[in-house]
Amino acid sequence: MRACLRPFHRSPLRDAGSRSAWHRRGHRRPLGPRRPGGPCLRREAPPGQRFGLPQADPKRAARGRGDRGAPLGPAARTLGLCSARREPRGSRKLIDLVTGGAGFLGRHVVHALLARGRGVRVLDIRHASDLPGEVQCVVGQITDAGTVARAMQGVERVFHLAAIPELWARDKTVFDRVNRGGTETVLAAARACPSLRAFVYTSSEVVLVPQKGVPVPPRLDETVELGVHQVIGPYARSKRAAELAVLAAAGEDLPACSVIPTMPVGPGDVSRTPPTRMIADLLAGRTPAYAEVMLNIVDARDAAEGHVLAAERGRLGERYLLSGHNRTMSALLAELTPLADRAMPHRRVPRTLARAFARVDEAVADRITHRPPTAPRDGVDIACRQHPFDNSKARDELGLAPRPLAETLHDTVAWLRQESPDKH
């Protein structure tokens, strides 16, 4: 049971009054950079104009094409300045900054950007020596304003993934200090960067799951607007507060949007995030029982593609749910069975028992072992309250197209066996 009770999540609060009445009436900020002296002057535009593509010449707008050949057309304004413009011959390569680019999802974002011919700079707490040689690496913390400012120099787009993705820590204040405080540091540096054209923040599915006492809608999507203290636990509160800060900045002077990946799974998870550990434990026979909960699994490669699509096509100040496939735990076990050398667990425990076990497990971790619990309390509570996720908005506006779950599971299991053949 222990792996199935792990947190299944990685890794703005928009309360009722967080978006002004001016925005709710459908008005949009003027297009162009945030300050004089940028590539184009600030100017008024109708709500349907795409962000960053001047519409004075209708023929040019009709000719515009995105990276995937989709017509730019009369859609709402987007962050996709870079994708709709060609750099003059001999100009410098466009640079994208990926905070947390040495992590599991961050690495896939880096490779998705390189595949598009972009220059990439990574800001992470560790140097990733296995990244391609053309990737620039800056080692440091996102809470260090000097390091962040140095990493931000000359970048055109920022993908802010860096965070503490766990649901338990000995010091509970670290979540707010890094996830919210670090995001505000990155936002401050982004505002001071004259070359910045798009900012994509990586949120988490936990910001859509309310605590006990708050009704859970039948399907979870971007319209779920929870307060900071309506989500479950310090990690979720820090991610929701950080998301609020990003969307508030988008309402002022920053070309930003938020993406919300669900449970990323796929090859290449060298740091063994909770979803990968769950699958590894199931394959190794270390899970004697499970609780029947709702999961949503997205291939990390598809979630990374969703990040880049958000920068190219996303609308200013919007949220995009990068979800994949809804599965109950029993359905997931059934799909893993043909890929496993051992039988999947058949014993199902009630959710009440799973919650009780998690509380005891975390109490032992907090007071005795000071090591991460097998089943963090917040992770179990979130899993037990999740409903199916709906990615219609990301499909319609970004072109998100998650691959079949069977392909994701096959590639994940094959990678795990290649990395640790004796354990899986």
Image (cartoon, rainbow, N blue to C red):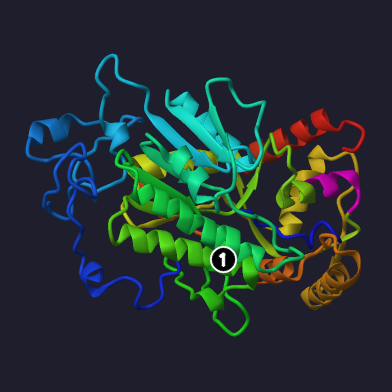
Seen at 65% across and 72% down, the residue is 233
Main secondary structure of the magenta stretch: helix
Give the residue at the far top of this rendering: 90
Q: Position of residue 138 (x, y in %)?
A: 56, 35
- Which region shows up in magenta? 279-286
Residue projecting furthest to the bottom: 213
Secondary structure beneath dot 1 equals helix
Looking at the picture, how far across and down is residue 65, in whole percent?
A: 26, 31
Please indicate whether residue 94 sits to the left or right of residue 127 in the image.
left
User: Residue 132 versus residue 289: which sits nearer the camera?
Assistant: 132
Q: Which residue is mark 1?
A: 238
Report if residue 135 is visible in the image: yes
Closest to the observer, 303 or 409: 303
Q: Residue at x 41, y 70 (%)?
A: 14
Residue 203 in view in this figure:
no
Q: How many marks?
A: 1
Residue 118 on image: x %, y %: 42, 27
- At label 1, the amino acid type is Ser
Quick check: 368 left or right of 187? right
- Relative to 379, is 320 on the left or the right? left
Quick one: label 1, few (<14), some, or many (20+) residues within 10 Å? many
Which of the 4 image quadrants contains residue 424?
top right
Residue at horizontal 34 percent and vertical 30 percent from the top: 67
